[in-house]
Structure formats: C-alpha cells, structure tokens
C-alpha cells in the first residue's frame, strides 16, 4: 500500500510518501505564490526520490494553508489534525503539540490515538509565527537558519518590549544602532516570541509530553526559550519536524486505504 501526504504552507511545501506504514521518501521546498504548483513540484521531488510515478500512489491527503488548491489529492485535512497524527506515530507518549507555521501558531491537546481534544491558534498577528522570525532575521541581516545558533552564543539578557512585528523590527534596529551584539538580540527575540506562543499553549492546558513540530522547531534557541516559558520539557521527533504535517496526512491516507480494504 503506497500513499502520500502533501502539506502546503505559506513559506514551504512538504511531501511524504509511505509504503506499508513506513516512510520511503520526503521532500521540502520553498513555496511559490501558487499553492497548487508548489504541491506538484514537491510531490514530484518525493516521487523521484522513491522511484515512483503519481500513478503508483493509491491515496493522497492534502493539508496546510494551500490544501484546497491541490488538484491531485483525494482528501484534505486540517493542519492540526495532521500534526497530531504524525507526532503520536513518532512518539506514542505525546499528549500535546505546538506547531509554529509561517503565518500562524497552533497548540493542541491530543489523545493516545492522535485525535485532537482541544486546540487554539493565533492567525491574527504575525508575532509568534515564522514570519516574525523571518522579518527579524532580515532586520539583523543574518540568514534565518542561523538565528537558533546565534541565540546560543548570547552573553547578555536583553528584552524586546514590542509584540507587533513592525514595532519590534524598529526596536531591533535601534538595538543594533546602539551597539548591542546580534546574538543577544536574537535571544531576546526568541524569548519574546516564546512568551506569546507559551500563553497560547497554556490557554488550552497543554500537558506533557509536548512535541514541538514544524520547521521553526529546528530553531534551538527558540525551542529553549519556549521550554523555559512553559516550564516544561519539549520533545523532538525522530523524523524531520518540518515534514510532520505531511507525515500525518500520509498516515491518514493509510488509514483510509486500510478501512477500504477491510470493508
């Protein structure tokens, strides 16, 4: 049984292909303005990696910001549901997830089967999202992927008082002009962002074990700041956290096919 999951977010597109409940290929690429085209391109990358064609895929589930614009999927599911399913498949002890995407931040409590019991999300303000970090990296003139490592080099404890992206960017530029070190500013940004995400997570009563999913979970500095803000440990998945949503979508595709074959 060969199935696939495709997750098209605002910043990246991800695809996972599974055969008999095992991952055989995965791919990530920067999303372009067309979600449908991004989905097709990342799926083609995964297919090439697996040595398969689209005709070999028995069922595909789409998720993410652009899920409704993917023309080759058989079913669409919410990001929260897919991230929950992927997290529990990776780590059965997980009972909560925190997922930070390009445009929103999400938190959910889940049961032992990966079903969502309660969730909350922030999609009204860019603070607490991947876009916040992207803007701040540009303001600091450093690659986004270096922000986490910079944080770990910090020696001074600064604070960012503004939650709004526009005002926070102005504050960051002011700190740079005053001569503060970039690692110290990066750490302050992560602390500010973590506080907002932790407040969201606490509002739904997250419980351990907590899995940190999504591409932002690769940022070690933010992960540390978030664990401190929650006063709880975060768990990191064995598979790429950035493809966890696509993995969950593929697992849902497997479930659909299994139910069809047993009917």
Image (tube, rainbow, N blue to C red):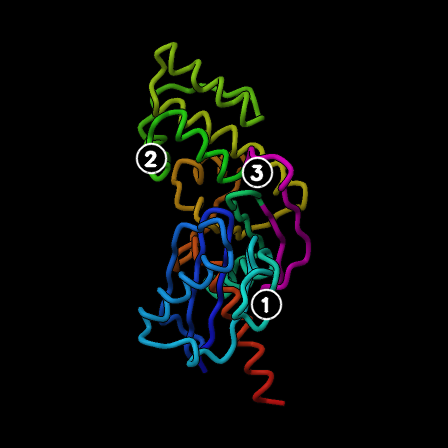
Residue at x 33% of width, y 30% of height:
142
Q: Is residue 185 above or below residue 4?
A: above
Label 3 vs 1, first from the N-terminus: 1
**Residue 113, disc:** 1
| Quadrant of image for the C terminus | bottom right
Q: Please identify, in this view, whether the residue under mark 3 or under mark 1 is nearer the observer.
A: 3
**Residue 25, disc:** none
Indicate the position of residue 10 as horizontal and vertical percent values: 51, 48
**Magenta stretch containing residue 122, yes or no?**
yes
Q: In this view, does 209 lie above or below 129?
A: below
Badge 2: residue crowd in 10 Å (few <14, some 14–19, many ≥20): few
Q: Please identify, in this view, whether the residue under mark 2 or under mark 1 is nearer the observer.
A: 2
| Quadrant of image for the N terminus | bottom left
Determine whether label 3 and label 2 are within 8 Å by CB.
no
Q: Mark 3 points at which residue?
A: 197
Q: Please identify, in this view, whether the residue under mark 3 or under mark 2 is nearer the observer.
A: 2
Q: Mark 2 points at which residue?
A: 143
> How far is the residue under mark 3 from the one under mark 2?
23 Å
> How far is the residue under mark 2 from the one under mark 1?
38 Å
**Magenta stretch containing residue 132, yes or no?**
no
Task: Assign a secondary structure to mark 1.
Answer: loop
Residue at x 43% of width, y 17% of height:
173
Badge 1: residue crowd in 10 Å (few <14, some 14–19, many ≥20): few
Stretch of the chain drawn in magenta: 106-128
Front-lying residue, 89 or 249? 249
Indicate the position of residue 169 as horizontal and vertical percent values: 48, 23
Left or right, residue 179 beside residue 120: left
Task: Assign a secondary structure to mark 3.
Answer: helix
Determine whether label 3 and label 1 are within 8 Å by CB.
no
Q: Can residue 84 be seen in this view?
A: no
Residue at x 64% of width, y 59% of height:
116
Image quarter of residue 199: top right
């Amino acid at each position: 049984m060969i199935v696939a999951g495709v997750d098209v977010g605002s910043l990246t597109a991800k695809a996972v292909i599974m055969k008999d409940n095992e991952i055989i290929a995965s791919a990530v690429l920067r999303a372009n303005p067309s979600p449908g085209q991004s989905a097709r391109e990342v799926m083609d990358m995964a297919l090439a990696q697996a040595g398969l064609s689209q005709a070999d895929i028995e069922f595909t589930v789409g998720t993410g910001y652009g899920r409704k614009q993917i023309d080759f999927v058989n079913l669409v599911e919410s990001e929260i549901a897919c991230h929950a399913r992927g997290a529990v498949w990776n780590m059965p002890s997980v009972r909560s997830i925190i997922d930070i995407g390009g445009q929103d931040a999400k938190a959910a409590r889940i049961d032992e089967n990966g079903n969502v019991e309660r969730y909350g999300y922030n999609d009204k303000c860019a603070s607490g999202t991947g876009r916040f970090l992207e803007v701040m990296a540009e303001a600091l003139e450093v690659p986004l992927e270096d922000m986490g490592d910079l944080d770990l080099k910090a020696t001074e404890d600064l604070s960012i008082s503004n939650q709004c992206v526009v005002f926070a960017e102005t504050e960051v530029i002011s700190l740079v002009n005053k001569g503060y070190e970039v690692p110290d500013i990066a750490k302050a940004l992560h602390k500010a962002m973590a506080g907002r995400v932790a407040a969201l997570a606490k509002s739904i009563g997250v419980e351990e074990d907590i899995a940190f999913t999504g591409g932002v979970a690769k940022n070690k500095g933010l992960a540390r700041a978030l664990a401190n803000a929650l006063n709880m440990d975060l768990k990191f998945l064995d598979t790429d956290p950035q493809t966890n949503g696509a993995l969950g979508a593929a697992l849902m595709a497997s479930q659909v096919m299994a139910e069809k074959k047993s009917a």
